[in-house]
Amino acid sequence: MSFSDALVTIKNGKSVYREGWNGKGMFVSLQTPDENSKMGLPYLYISTVDGKLVPWLASQTDILADDWEIKE
């Protein structure tokens, strides 16, 4: 699917990943802060190969890719 479709999927509470990513098990999700969060606005994060969660910004390659998949 396209990045546009992937973004809608993320906003609907699911996680997505790119088939073309070398690191298996990585995925992108949405974090919506609550009253206990240090962040004040929603943001995307990626789960890295070793399971660490870090804020994520899409590259131009990610935005133009059509190999996005829904994480089951």
Image: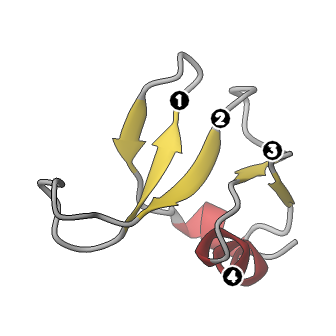
The residue that label 4 is drawn on is 8
Q: Position of residue 9 (x, y in %)?
A: 73, 73
**Label 3 – label 4 distance at C-alpha:** 20 Å
Marks 2,4: beta carbons within 8 A: no
Q: Residue at x 73, y 39 (%)?
A: 21
Residue 26 tag number: 2
User: Residue most toward the left?
Assistant: 38
The kind of secondary structure element at disc 1 is loop
Discs 1/3, front: 1
- Label 4: few (<14), some or many (≥20) within 10 Å? few
Q: In this view, does 36 lie to the left or right of 34?
A: left
Most foreground residue, 10 or 18: 10
**Label 2 – label 1 distance at C-alpha:** 5 Å
> Mark 2 or mark 4, which has the lower sequence index?
4
Most foreground residue, 45 or 33: 33
Q: Which residue is drawn at 50% across and 44% down?
A: 46
Q: Where is residue 2 in the image (x, y as percent from the top left)?
A: 80, 76
Residue 48 tag number: 1
Marks 2,3: beta carbons within 8 A: no
Q: Is residue 31 left or right of residue 26?
A: left
Residue 4 tag number: none
Q: What amino acid type is highlighted by mark number 4?
A: Val
How was the colour assigned to the protein in this rendering? secondary structure
> Mark 1 or mark 4, which has the lower sequence index?
4
**Label 1 – label 3 distance at C-alpha:** 15 Å
The residue that label 3 is drawn on is 20
> Mark 2 or mark 3, which has the lower sequence index?
3
